[in-house]
Image: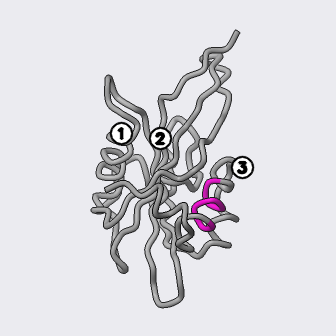
Amino acid sequence: MPAIVSRIVEVCIFSFSGAGPEYLLLRRSPSEQIYPGIWQFVSGSVEGAETALAAARREMAEETALPPLDFWVVPHVNVFYDPSRDSVNLTPVFAARVAPGSEPKLSTEHSEYLWCDYTTALGKLVWPGQREALRILQEYVVRGSQAAGRSRIV
């Protein structure tokens, strides 16, 4: 029977420009062993006894060096099966708002970045769970629904 694990976190970074919300996508370096060249959110593994929230904040710092102005739990958990480990992975999704005009400093894991609107971001994300996380982020956090106030992390 497959194990159910939660070892990975994702952080969708966004900002507000004059045209509206923009989302930061990172392109995995061509030399990366896992999923080279795909566009994604900040993502990474939980280390040791680290909480998912601590891992999300650390991964955001490591992969972009951007300081968050606000941070949220997105009301979505990405789920995928890893056949190499026979495990079902539950991946919590977080969101971070950064200052307009922010320029990330990429780690070696990524080769480029793109600030883009919602429709462009949807078209670039490969995995259905990431597209669904972006949809929920757009609806419940970016548009400022009641859920945004309840899922904001101080």
In the image, 56: left or right of 1? left
Residue 128 disc label? 3
Q: Quickly name the residue at label 2.
A: 9
Residue at 51%, 28% (x, y): give it. 6
Q: Quickly name the residue at label 1.
A: 55
Q: Quadrant of residue 36?
A: top right
Residue at 30%, 48% (x, y): give it. 62
- Can you give x and y, in whole percent of width and height, for residue 104 in the image? 34, 65
Packing grade of label 2 (10 A; few <14, some 14-19, many >=20) is: many
- Tell me which label, 2 or 3, sits earlier in the chain: 2
- Tell me which label, 1 or 2, sits earlier in the chain: 2
Q: Secondary structure at mark 2?
A: strand
Q: Main SS of the magenta segment?
A: helix
Residue 16 painted magenta: no
Kindly tell me whether residue 29 is visible in this rendering.
no
Please state the extent of the stretch shown in magenta in the rendering. 133-139
Residue at 58%, 32% (x, y): give it. 90
Camera-side residue of 5 and 152? 152
Residue at 65%, 36% (x, y): give it. 79
* Alpha carbon separation for disc pair 1 and 3: 23 Å
Residue 74, compared with residue 19, is above or below; it is above
Amino acid at the residue labelled 2 = Val
Amino acid at the residue labelled 1 = Ala
Residue 135 painted magenta: yes
